[in-house]
Amino acid sequence: MAGIYIETYGCQMNEYDSELVKTILHENHHDLHGAEEDADVILLNTCAVRENAFNKIFSRVGNLKHLRRSHKVKVGILGCMAQNIKNKLLENPNIDFCVGPDNYRELPELIQKSLGKTKNESSTRLSKEETYSDVQPTREDSINAWIAIMRGCDNFCTFCVVPFTRGRERSRSVESIVSEATQAVKEGKKQVTLLGQNVNSYKNGEDDFCTLIEAVSEVKGLQRIRFTSPHPKDFPDHLLHLIAQKENICKQIHLPLQAGNTEVLTRMKRDYSREEFLHLAQKMRKLIPGVSLSTDIIVGFPGERDDQFEDTASLMEEVRFDSAYIFKYSPREGTYALKHYPDDVHEDEKKRRIIKLNEMQRKHTTESLSRMLGLECEVLVEREETHLSKEQCQGRTDQGTTVVIPQNGSLKCGDQVRVIIKDKTAHVLIGELIS
Ligand code: SAH
Ligand code: SF4
Ligand code: F3S
């Protein structure tokens, strides 16, 4: 039995996968409770989506060198970097083994081998079937249960490494997902977040995402359902009506835009035009009153001219997203864009563009928060104290906005309370309990 310490980077799917890994290792009698300093093996569950994700891991591996020397700790790389650049990782003398996202069942064996000898090993064969649907995750969050409903992505957006690190799309059965959600409620969870690299492309036989989310919404005692990350191409009207009608499906949609110019979208292979995206966003706002829309945007995609960038800015003005994650384009190994489109927008120009959009988004986020002032809403308590004060607790609205409220001494994680919004900061609402 070895002491294992696991650190997770990247998206929520990685968070969930780390929970699966914990179960797999626990079943093999490893101890997962110790601190980093006491571990025999340190696992880094990594992301490959942008260059800075790589840099973070290489510097972390460098930091761990002393533990390898002094305590003979083994270092294993899991996740998307392991899949994407395994050969480069295995050349690194401070990395002992690599395991890709579809091979976690082989981890106990690789750990065993690494403890016995020093040679680097890897297991990174992508699977067409692996969904881990029979592995119950080891959950640590007291409120939310992540549930992966599908894995992989077949879209091959030209900038994106995910189809190469996560492989082909495959979905679990409705029954296994509903049973996992039911189990989560039994364990006291109030919310499930359905996960997939392309979550609304879910397809299992005749069952699509609408069938699934409707079935999950019937789970007794489940207060909130969220899902991420969806693709704009898979939002039939029926799904919007379901979100509007079902009380426990949260009125919060992440709608990744990437770019607001149709020619750029075509070269990104996003499958929608500027007009189609606008139409969808407007329809969401109309059919789902009060819906909160967030997005992802890339600036400086190869060949993006200034006027094309301005189209993204003007689309943001029009939609007024409640929040947005804005990234500079980062060329990725294996992608179509890396092979065919030179990364020709200068770094300074990418910087100018990201600053401009972040500036705009700050205004839109402020507007969105300001609209809540004086209103009443339901808040699900997620933390009994904030990092700033023990006299405050923290939760979220249905739309996913964080609300800080005074701790009256009896508020517990999982309580759902009615709050009036009194004030706001840059990203957070300040509320008061309505007695
Ligand atoms: N499945 C998700 C994407 C996951 S990656 C989806 O389709 O929305 C999360 C975000 O990272 C993407 O939406 C995109 O905005 C950004 N991203 C992906 N590849 C990138 C790259 N090569 N450079 C910069 N940003 C990128
Ligand atoms: Fe990447 Fe596009 Fe798939 Fe999202 S939909 S994971 S951006 S290839
Ligand atoms: Fe990163 Fe892999 Fe998720 S590349 S965003 S950890 S699917």
Image (spheres, rainbow, N blue to C red):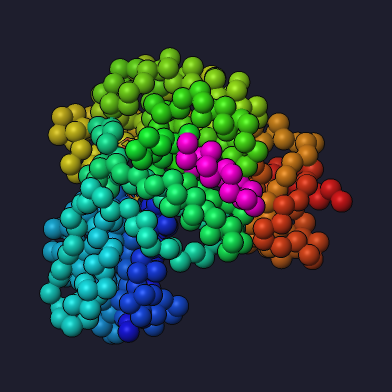
Q: Is residue 11 above or below residue 308?
A: below
Image quadrant where residue 42 sits: bottom left
Query: In percent of the image, x 25 and y 42: which residue is there?
Result: 168
Foreground residue among 88 and 356: 88
* Magenta residues (range): 211-227
Q: Where residue 62 sits in the image (x, y, percent)?
A: 27, 68
Q: Where residue 67 sits in the image (x, y, percent)?
A: 31, 79
Image quadrant where residue 1 sits: bottom left
Horizontally, residue 115 falls left or right of residue 428, namely: left
- Asked if the magenta segment contains residue 219, the reply would be yes
Foreground residue among 264 and 170: 170
- Asked if the magenta segment contains residue 142, the reply would be no
The answer to whether any part of residue 246 appears in the image is yes
Query: In percent of the image, x 62 and y 54: which residue is there?
Result: 190
Q: Where residue 196 sits in the image (x, y, percent)?
A: 39, 44
Query: In percent of the image, x 72 and y 35: which residue is there?
Result: 372
Q: Where residue 273 sits in the image (x, y, percent)?
A: 37, 18
Foreground residue among 169 and 346: 169
Query: In percent of the image, x 37 and y 35: which residue is there?
Result: 206
The answer to whether any part of residue 56 appears in the image is no
